[in-house]
Image (cartoon, rainbow, N blue to C red):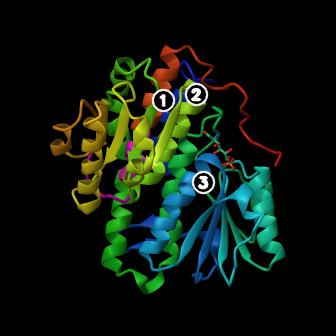
Amino acid sequence: GKSGYDHYMLKEIHEQPRALRQCLSGRVDERRGEVTLSELEGLETPSAVHLVACGTSYHAALYGVQLFHSLGIPAQAFLASEYATGVPPLGDSLVVGITQSGETADTLSALREARARGARTLAVTNVVGSTAARECDYALYIRAGPEIGVAATKTFSSQLVSLNLLVEYLAGDQRSSEERRAVLQTLRDLPGRVQQVLDESMAEEVAAEYLGADGYFFIGRGLNYPVALEGALKFKEITYEHAEGFAAGELKHGTLALVTENTPVFAVVTGEDAPAKKTLGNVREVESRGAPVIAVTDDDQIERYADASLRVPSGSARVAPVLVNVQLQLVAYWVANALGRSIDKPRNLAKSVTVE
Ligand code: M6R
């Protein structure tokens, strides 16, 4: 059942702290700086990685790419439906299929194509015994628990955390034990922080304030770029309103022409480093066109530039996207709810897409 929530989606958004604890359970020893992923025994650190996925899982792949890059491992994300039409040179890349259902036809055929060319394959999936899990050489389970809502919510968060575990597991001596301990501590603290976001979110108020706009934009940079894309996808999927996500810096290369006083911009800005400063510059660009700006942020300073803000607890830039995403899930949910949409089963969509 929905345990008192009006929709499975809202229930599943609220289940995220538990889903993440399950994902981490027994896999992380933050004191010793060790990650145990028994299902990956024998998997060696790859020299390069291709990540293939669709939809929300593709956004997780884009995030994963940046984690691999932080290890010095070349990585690329591909839309699964494009991968098979022109498989890029594989070398001895590990091909990682990210698919919560393990049954998405496009992702399965990308993985089959890679296998046919001799690549090692790994499925990152929620479903034990799914086709992807059975067909790949390895399967890493994200352990989010069953997700009924068509919109992927807790499975996305669990994918991001699982990718963190995967990368730390493969890091070998690329990471000092001190670095690894710090990352693992951050992951350990994450479920509590997600709970804090859920308890304190102002997303319902923000949703009410910006109903009826012409369109909605989501911008972010670096690790926050994939969640800007994901924020927009979730928004279109369940509200049926027009939304688009962008790399913050890309906005001025065309899309800025669409920005008006009736297109709210959700600007994801976390951390205090150079990327955040640059995104602030992009915030000013949209503001000077009169667009309302909603900062999704861990920084008080940014609030001065924004018309509204959705706060996340400050801390590691690496996990901030998980926190930010919870706020964006809630905004999409509350807008869809106000519009009376069919939130758990949006029109035209299916939970798992088994045709190419
Ligand atoms: O089961 P998968 O992770 O392979 O599904 C891929 C996409 O169909 C899926 O993520 C879809 O985009 C979401 N339901 C959107 O919320």
Magenta residues span 310-326
Front residue (pair 43, 296): 296
Q: Tell me which numbered mark, 3 or 1, is placed earlier along the sequence.
A: 3
Residue on which disc 3 sits: 58
87 lies left or right of 267: right
The amino acid sitting under disc 2 is Ile
Q: How many marks?
A: 3
Q: Say few, some or many: other residues with alpha carbon within 10 Å of mark 2 (under 14 / 14 to 19 / 20 or more).
A: many
The x and y percentages for residue 107 are: 74, 56
Front residue (pair 301, 157): 301
Q: At 74% across and 55% down in the image, what residue appears? A: 81
Q: Quadrant of the N terminus?
A: top right
The x and y percentages for residue 235 are: 52, 32
User: Taking the image as drawn, is residue 70 in sight?
Assistant: yes
Q: Tell me which numbered mark, 2 or 1, is placed earlier along the sequence.
A: 2
Q: At 31% across and 39% down in the image, what residue appears? A: 286
- In the image, is the residue at mark 3 within 8 Å of ligand 1 by its beta carbon? yes
Check disc 1 and report its element: helix, strand or loop.
helix
Q: State how far apart marks 3 and 2 are (Cα).
A: 18 Å
346 lies left or right of 249: right
Q: State how far apart marks 2 and 1 are (Cα).
A: 7 Å
305 lies left or right of 136: left
Residue on which disc 1 sits: 332
Residue on which disc 2 sits: 238
Check disc 3 and report its element: helix, strand or loop.
helix
**Picture layout, residue 309 above or below residue 179:** above
The numbered mark at residue 254 is none
